[in-house]
Amino acid sequence: MVREVLLGFYENKDTPRKNLQVKIITQSIESLIDKELMIGYGVRTPHRWFIKEIKLTDKGVKLTRKLFGEQLSLPIK
């Protein structure tokens, strides 16, 4: 379910193949979890994660707000 929602990012863009899109999103989610910016809920087997739901941590929310603030304040000529 999580990946299907995040795959919406690739709509109407020149994108990699569908299986590569899923791999990219999965690696990004796992990276954010490792950096303690996101919490993943699901099942962990010895070989892979089956992530069912994701949630930003407080640290992730603060960083997101900071990034949106920096990006919105860029001067456009």
Image: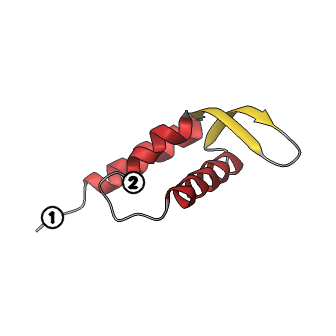
In the rendered image, which residue does mark 1 sit on? 76
Residue located at (58% from left, 41% from top): 59
Q: Where's residue 67, x and y in %?
A: 41, 52
Q: Is residue 2 left or right of residue 44?
A: left
63 vs 70: above or below: above
Q: Is residue 45 left or right of residue 57?
A: right
Q: Which mark is residue 10?
A: 2
6 vs 58: above or below: below
Quarter of the figure with the C terminus? bottom left
Q: Is residue 11 left or right of residue 2?
A: left
- Which amino acid does the dot numbered 2 rest on? Tyr
| Camera-nearest label, 2 or 1 | 2
Whole-number angstrom distance, CA of label 2 to CA of label 1: 26 Å
Quarter of the figure with the N terminus? top right
Q: Is residue 30 left or right of residue 15?
A: right
Q: Where's residue 35, x and y in %?
A: 67, 51
**Nearest to the observer: residue 19 or residue 60:** 19
Label 2: element kind: helix
Q: Where's residue 10, x and y in %?
A: 39, 54
Label 1: element kind: loop
Residue located at (46% from left, 38% from top): 5
- Which amino acid does the dot numbered 1 rest on? Ile
Disc 2 packing (10 Å; few <14; some 14–19; many ≥20): few
Residue located at (65% from left, 36% from top): 39
